[in-house]
Amino acid sequence: MERNYEQRLRLTFSKTGWTRFIGHLDLARALERALNRARIPMSYTQGFNRRPRMQVAAALSLGVTSECELTDIWLTEERVPSKVQRQLAEKMPPGIEILQVEAVPLSEPALQTRTAVSVYRVTLLDPPPPDLAARVAELLAAKTWLQVRQRGRKRKEYDLRPLILDITLDETGGQLTMRLRQEMERTGRPDETLHALGIDPLAARIHRQQLTLKPL
């Protein structure tokens, strides 16, 4: 089948404020609307249910903000990335800011397969437990840390420990930095890590600071 695209662009954008309550699918729709309003010549999949060619690197959990979200889009015509950034900036909803647009090779692997590490800044809204440093040390020293994920009626046991690369506390003890695996089949989640530390995720602000891709 003949390809219907000529350029692949990578968008880096932030997601802050009220947009932390926008789910993954609604975010994709917001990006699609902004691209259409900015008259970016998007390539569409072929078939009955045509969709814009778009790949999101790693979906954010509801309630989490970010300064490093990545999405690839495919265009039917080549455009200057800086001009695309300016066009999009005028059409994005409040809370979503396009930070960078760059051209990437068409042959590059799917964005989702290249994610490696996510770094999160977690700010506790309540006074931190006095033994939080000891809890972090215990979790990092453990060889295994079994948890249960539940979706509907399905329960699945998994080992959280290999998904955590590092956790550090700031001097006040009220802010944690988590380096978690961000791979397709091995993804660490900050809310589950907070649960393991005995902290309610709803009593924290979670912000993704960095998303690292595997080298080509």
Image (cartoon, grey):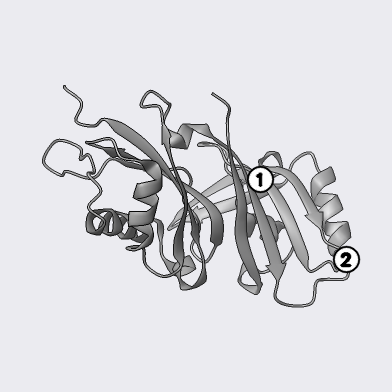
Q: Residues within 10 Å of mark 1 (few under 14, many from 20)?
A: many
Secondary element at image label 2? loop
Residue 72 seen from this side = no
Which residue corresponds to the image point at 88% horizontal and 58% vertical from the top-left?
134
Q: Residue at x 74, y 41 (%)?
A: 144
Q: What amino acid does circle 2 point to?
A: Asp
Task: Specify whether 172 is left or right of 208.
Answer: right
Q: What is the spatial separation of the Cα atoms under label 1 and label 2, in whole angstroms?
A: 22 Å
Position in image of residue 56 (x %, y %): 41, 45
Residue assigned mark 1 = 180
Residue 4 image label = none
Residue that numbered label 2 is attached to: 131
- Determine crowd level at label 2: few under 14, some 14-19, many 20+ residues with C-alpha closer than 10 A: few
Residue 19 position within the rendered picture, expressed as x and y whole percent measured from the top left: 45, 68
Looking at the rendered image, the quarter that the C terminus falls into is: top right
Tell me the element at label 1: strand
Q: Is residue 166 visible?
A: yes
Q: Report the amino acid beneath label 1.
A: Leu
Question: Residue 179: image x %, image y %?
Answer: 69, 47
Residue 33, above or below 104: below
Q: How many marks?
A: 2
Q: Residue furthest left?
A: 48
In percent of width and height, residue 37 lies at 23, 59
